[in-house]
Amino acid sequence: MLWFKKQPKDVQVIERDLIVPAELTLPFDANLFQQHFSNLKHVAEQDAGLDAYISSMQSKQKLYAESLNEAAIDSLSLEKIEVLLELVFTARRRVYPVLQKMGEQQSVLLIKTLLYGNGMLLERMQSFTEALPVDEGADKAGQKLAAKIKRAAFDFAAEMLHYTDPVKYPLMSRWVWDQSTVSGALREFIRGNDHMAEVPLGNSPEMFEGARKWLAEQVAEQGIYKDVPFWVDMVLADAYSTYFRSMAEGMLSADFGRSGGPEEYVKKFLGIDTMRRSGRTRVKKDSEVQVTN
């Protein structure tokens, strides 16, 4: 959860999944934060405005919290899971067919174990992806597709945690940071990152919380003390949007479709982009990968 000050040594805090922020292995640059913060404001002004972005994120959070809280999760359905997936751009095209094949009961149990089961947080997230009955097959194409599905499932797990309790859990999606590809929004806050072959931030929840703590402190320097988790997410989305638009879109656009201006990328990363007309879902219902029984 967000920590602004060190806790007294004589105070024992006992809380499930209490994430103590780690010290960052590389320094973040406040000037780079200011650039992204200023750009975020500019981008939002060309669109519906920052208040509208916050309102959309609050609505998303309410949907997740109402659907996934411990008292309600046993009544979760595949239809509701589809609604939740609709709001996760990296997962909406890959995860649903596997969960559908598993069946509603097993899918709900898998999500419940992720959110409220025993074990360390990162282990539960990894177990969530590994439990998906995806047949990797014998050929490289099948193995590559299966890996994509599991990575998408990890993002879905990250968003379920974050939006169920955005104060407790930082957003740990791959677009925020992916140590395996050494890419993500966090890299954009490191001065000289373009020349770094290695960026050893790691992928622990403690690292994500340490980064979020730093970003929250920068947000506070702007005089903002309300909805801080969402402000942090918005600045991260702007940072990753800057990175994304600097790359060849043909290399990265498979998960994004054809977007318009920078505001569309920011909203897509946050999962608050405009849905299709007539209520048509963007969740893909079929999959090229084989699902095991």
Image: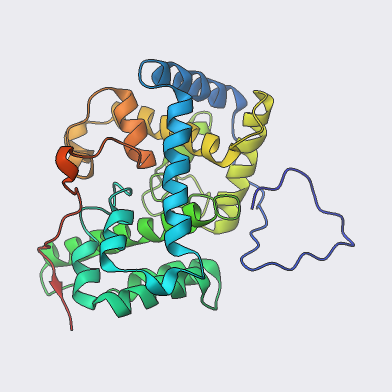
Residue at figure coordinates x 17%, y 80% from the top left: 292
Along the viewing direction, whichever of 189 and 84 lies nearer the viewer:
84
Along the viewing direction, whichever of 221 and 24 lies nearer the viewer:
221
Quadrant where the C terminus is found in the figure = bottom left
Residue at figure coordinates x 48%, y 44% from the top left: 199
At which x and y percent is residue 184?
41, 42
Relative vertical location of residue 256 with respect to residue 151 in this rendering, above or below = above
Mark yes or no: residue 127 visible: no
**Can you name the residue that lies furthest to the bottom here?**
293
| Residue 22 as seen in the image, left or right of residue 12 | left
Residue at figure coordinates x 52%, y 39% from the top left: 230
Mark yes or no: residue 153 visible: yes
The part of the image, by quadrant, that contains residue 20 is bottom right
At which x and y percent is residue 35?
51, 20
| Residue 73 as seen in the image, left or right of residue 224 | left
At which x and y percent is residue 77?
30, 69
